[in-house]
Image: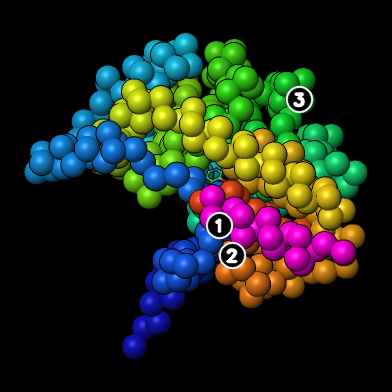
């Protein structure tokens, strides 16, 4: 019999895997705090649930590309509906952008660490991911190093702003250096809604038609399980995304939820909830001598290397002592002892505070 693996295109089984098995564990153990996946711990409002239920009654019909919603998203950013393409979560954008710009043998440039979905989806197009380590001293993007890593095979660049997992913003002057290369570039602004005082990089999209922004409603807006995201780009690039996304990629329910979340303005309370807990976490972590990185999103990278404990030991202790899922962070530039945490429900977040005091406290 033929081995099916011989029939599959070669890069399917060699691409780095984006492993989601932690979610199977988390759903199976609802008493454990989910502080590992940058989810929003606040459920959708009643209005959102009602909007989903109402539109579900029309679930026999195919969805359109909802001009009204695209206009509202456009208004949010001072652009037109033609500048917006709707996605089934920003992961769909990650997948589509790879297939729009990369062929087997091409290079995709980003940092390491990064959100691991990116190298995975690039690999699934047969492309190579070139990952440049963050700067040792401050874990900021190594802009000079990334620029030096550009070759004539580099067909797509990624900057996550603020970066995941470090939470650090990149300077505009540095972003512009990448834009000036003329190579397609994604600025992933998944977490920008937690700091609305920092503007989305719309000006760059207007000036450089090869630059696009990726947004999601999975984070501050709290719709991760409902799946909604969008791209902001020049109209020709929006056309390319719409061709590459599947028709009917966004369900009626997801669009109704997204529109209602926008209309209710509930994001404000969700952002406040997150940022208040972050302030508490920073205080508690510093009190026991650990180094929290800036919590500009709904996650915080913590350097606990001073304790000599490994990330594996810390994450295991969080589970053993307080039944908390924390995020394992592979050694950064050879240094072990980092972990990442996202605020949970009030009760889970209190458990995390207790964990910090009891595990790391003197
Ligand atoms: C930087 C970044 N981009 C995109 C995503 C994917 O989000 P979603 O597909 O839920 O929109 C994540 C999820 O954690 C992320 O960290």
Residue sitting at 85 percent across and 41 percent down? Answer: 138
Q: Earlier in the sequence, mark 1 or mark 2?
A: 2
CA distance for labels 3 and 2: 34 Å
Measured as percent of width and height from the top left, residue 337 is found at 80, 62
Check disc 1 and report its element: helix, strand or loop.
helix
In the shown orientation, is residue 193 left or right of residue 279? left
Is 294 contained in the magenta span?
no
Check disc 3 and report its element: helix, strand or loop.
loop
Q: Which residues are magenta?
A: 346-362
Is 352 contained in the magenta span?
yes
Q: Residue 203 lies in what quarter of the image?
A: top right
Q: Are marks 3 and 2 in contact (CB under 8 Å)?
A: no
Between tags 1 and 3, which lies in front? Answer: 1
The correct choice, above or below, for 79 with respect to 346 in the image is above
- Check disc 2: other Cα within 10 Å, few if <14, some if 14-19, many if 20+: many
Q: Which residue is mark 1?
A: 348
């Amino acid at each position: 019999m033929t081995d099916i693996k011989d029939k599959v295109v070669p890069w399917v089984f060699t691409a780095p895997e984006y492993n989601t098995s932690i979610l199977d564990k988390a759903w199976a153990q609802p008493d454990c705090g989910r502080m590992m996946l940058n989810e929003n711990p606040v459920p959708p409002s009643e209005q959102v649930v009602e909007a989903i239920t109402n539109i579900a009654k029309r679930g026999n019909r195919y969805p359109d590309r909802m001009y009204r919603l695209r206009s509202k998203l456009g208004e949010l950013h001072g652009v037109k509906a033609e500048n917006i393409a709707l996605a089934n979560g920003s992961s769909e954008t990650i997948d589509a952008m790879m297939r729009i710009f990369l062929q087997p043998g091409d290079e995709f440039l980003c940092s390491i660490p990064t959100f691991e979905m990116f190298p995975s989806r690039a690999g699934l197009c047969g492309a190579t991911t070139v990952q440049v380590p963050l700067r040792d001293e401050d874990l900021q993007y190594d802009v000079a190093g990334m620029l030096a890593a550009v070759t004539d095979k580099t067909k797509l660049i990624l900057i996550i702003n603020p970066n995941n997992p470090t939470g650090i913003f990149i300077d505009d002057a540095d972003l512009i250096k990448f834009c000036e290369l003329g190579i397609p570039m994604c600025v992933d602004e998944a977490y920008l809604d937690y700091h609305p005082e920092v503007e989305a990089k719309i000006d760059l999209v207007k000036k450089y038609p090869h630059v696009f922004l990726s947004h999601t409603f999975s984070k501050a807006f709290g719709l991760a399980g409902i799946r909604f995201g969008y791209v902001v780009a020049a109209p020709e690039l929006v056309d390319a995304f719409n061709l590459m996304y599947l028709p009917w990629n966004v369900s009626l329910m997801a669009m109704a939820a997204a529109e209602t979340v926008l209309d209710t303005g509930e994001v404000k309370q969700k952002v406040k909830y997150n940022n208040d807990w972050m302030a508490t976490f920073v205080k508690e972590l510093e009190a026991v001598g650990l180094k929290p990185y800036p919590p500009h999103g709904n996650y915080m990278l913590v350097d606990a290397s001073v304790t000599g404990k490994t990330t594996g030991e810390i994450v295991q202790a969080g589970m053993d002592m307080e039944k908390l899922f924390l995020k394992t962070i592979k050694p950064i530039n050879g240094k072990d002892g980092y972990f990442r945490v996202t605020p949970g429900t009030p009760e889970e977040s209190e458990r995390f505070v207790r964990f910090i005091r009891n595990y790391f406290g003197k």
